[in-house]
């Protein structure tokens, strides 16, 4: 599988991050499926998600649009692609590639309950919840999540929510957002696959959010390739 597919898979695994609150610049290190990723944000319109496990590729969300930047683009792939609006279709391909395994994009939170336990993640105190999710086939599963009312954790979660909305749309992300309580809306851990390792209020440099070249629309590129193959 190429680095673009791996990069998108990492995002699909974490799209269940939610909530909205206040905005401040910062940086967070998040382990996803054993791989370490770094997310930086300046505000709700300017977010970067680095995935070292994908040959240095990263995503940028700016002004409501999402881009994939490939540092080692190969096979005629452009170094910068606009991917907003394409992730839902890609999630179906991931499901097929996984032999029917449901992507988090296809899951709905149907129940969320505190179990009376505390847990500290990335130096931040949180409360353990049980989340019940249901996929499009009606199959349910339960996992544990650690949520907190820590303002910095909420800002980090908000940044990822904004990134997710640029890729899959506000309506789909709202299902997760609305399932969470008003207080503890900062996500520190989701099952064993996603764990926040560190969060810091370190403003990233503005130039780290600049696109290195003119972006190519992923949908337009795929349609062109299909037409050429006919």
Image: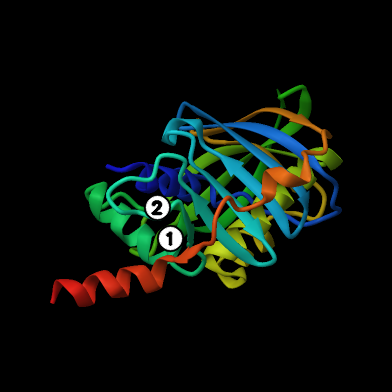
Residue designated by label 2: 103
Look at the numbered disc 2 and give the secondary structure of its residue. Answer: loop
Above or below: residue 226 compared with residue 78? below
Q: Which residue is mark 1?
A: 106
Residue displayed at 82% across by 49% down: 183
Q: Residue at x 75, y 31 (%)?
A: 199
Left or right of residue 48, residue 192 in this image:
left
Q: What is the x, y in percent for residue 17? A: 62, 49
Q: Are marks 1 and 2 in contact (CB under 8 Å)?
A: yes
Q: Is residue 79 among the parts visible in the rendering?
A: yes
Q: Can residue 107 be spotted in the picture?
A: no
* SS class, disc 1: helix
Q: Nearer the viewer, residue 79 or 22?
A: 79
Q: Position of residue 167 (x, y in %)?
A: 54, 63
Q: What x and y, as percent, mark residue 77?
A: 35, 54
User: Within 10 Å of the Cα at label 1, are there few (<14), some (14-19), or many (20+) other Cα atoms?
Assistant: some
Provide residue 171's location: percent of width, then percent of height. 59, 72
Q: According to the image, what is the colour scheme of the structure?
A: rainbow
Q: Is residue 139 left or right of residue 58?
A: left
Residue 122 placement: quadrant:
top right
| Left or right of residue 225: residue 62 | right
């Amino acid at each position: 599988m190429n680095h673009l597919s791996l990069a998108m898979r990492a995002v699909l695994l974490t799209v269940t991050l939610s909530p909205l609150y206040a905005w401040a610049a910062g940086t967070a290190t998040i382990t996803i499926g054993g791989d370490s990723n770094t997310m930086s944000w300046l505000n709700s319109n300017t977010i970067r998600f680095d995935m070292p496990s994908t040959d240095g590729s990263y995503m940028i969300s700016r002004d409501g649009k999402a881009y994939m930047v490939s540092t080692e683009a190969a096979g005629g792939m452009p170094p910068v692609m606009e991917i907003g609006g394409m992730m839902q279709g890609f999630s179906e391909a991931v499901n097929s590639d996984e032999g029917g395994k449901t992507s988090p994009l296809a899951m709905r939170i149907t129940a969320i309950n505190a179990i009376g336990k505390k847990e500290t993640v990335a130096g931040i105190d949180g409360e353990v919840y049980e989340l019940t999710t249901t996929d499009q086939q009606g199959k349910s599963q339960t996992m544990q999540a650690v949520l907190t009312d820590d303002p910095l954790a909420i800002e980090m979660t908000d940044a990822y929510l904004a990134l997710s909305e640029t890729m899959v749309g506000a309506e789909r992300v709202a299902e997760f957002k609305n399932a969470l309580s008003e207080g503890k809306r900062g996500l520190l851990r989701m099952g064993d696959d996603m764990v926040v390792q560190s969060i810091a209020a370190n403003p990233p440099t503005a130039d780290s959010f600049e696109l290195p070249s003119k972006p190519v629309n992923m949908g337009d590129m795929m349609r062109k390739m299909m037409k050429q193959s006919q």
